[in-house]
Image (cartoon, rainbow, N blue to C red):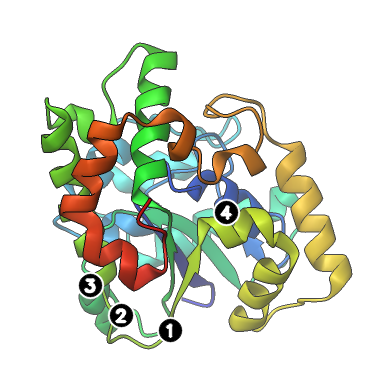
Amino acid sequence: MELKPVLVQALGRSGTTFLMRLLASHPRIVAHERYPLEFPLFRSLAFPSDSEALRTLKAKRWRFGDDEELLYRPLEDQRYPTETDIERIYTKIAEEQGKSPCYFAEKCLPNADISGAMKRFPDLRVITLLRDPRDIFVSARAFNEKRGVKEFAERFAETDEEIVLYNKERYTALLAAGEDCRNRTTIKYEALITDSNNTLQNIFDWLGIDASAEAVQFASARARGLEDGQHVTSSSQAGSVGRWREEMPESIIELHRQHFGDILTELGYPSG
């Protein structure tokens, strides 16, 4: 493919939507920007065992202007999209956005087989996005309460400890996924929020695209301007960092000490 894939890999409630909007605000990166920015076109090809991606794609939850045939008709008689399909669809999206991109961006799951995907697609770039697991817990719970749903770990676990253990399993998989692979970089949500411009400049530099102050400021302003509150659960982005200190009961803090202690230390997060 002439267009190169960039995948954002993280646990849910780690800031993936904001990071995707930042990436998609660069003229050299294209993405399907309909909320929640989880268009799984390349993901369904790169990770064949990811049945959720293919099921979501086949369910036609995604819209491409008024031209559904462009997106779906070529997929009707085949199990997975081809590289030709991916190139064609993202090129068309880029044309509608007035872009001449060299990358397209998508999200992927924390346990995705990055090593396997990089063997098949040598040009693949992966951004691993980390967030304090206690803030992930608090944010996910607040999201579920706001929406009246059970998403994220609460789909698969009942008790607080089960949720913490489920998150630890996913977090461990995220840290291990492709750790020995080239073309992979790791950033923290906290840096993305508190030092946004420098963090974004480093990402653009790493991708080899315009990382000037103007490009960074434009992307940052555009991404923040697109925020519509659909997935926000804190009063401000700054207030989303370390929110667990005020919102998390001591019993759940202790569960994170027990089960995430080594990970918190390794990543430089305070133990509490």
For residue 19, the mark is 4
Dots 3 and 1: beta carbons under 8 Å? no
Horizontal side of residue 74 vs 192, given as left or right:
left
Dots 2 and 4: beta carbons under 8 Å? no
In the rendered image, residue 203, in percent from the top left (x then y), is placed at 61, 73
Name the kind of residue labelled 4 in the image. Answer: Leu
Q: CA distance from mark 3 to mark 4?
A: 21 Å
Q: Say if 112 sits above or below 97 in the image.
A: below
Helix, strand or loop under label 4: helix
In the rendered structure, which disc, 2 or 3, sits on the residue that comes first in sequence?
A: 2
Q: CA distance from mark 2 to mark 4?
A: 21 Å
Dots 3 and 4: beta carbons under 8 Å? no
Helix, strand or loop under label 3: helix
Task: Identify residue for label 2.
Answer: 118
In the rendered structure, which disc, 3 or 4, sits on the residue that comes first in sequence?
A: 4
How busy is the neighbourhood of tag 1: few (under 14 within 10 Å), some, or many (20 plus)?
Answer: some
Q: Say if 75 sits above or below 172 in the image.
A: above
Task: Identify residue for label 3.
Answer: 176
Q: CA distance from mark 2 to mark 1?
A: 9 Å
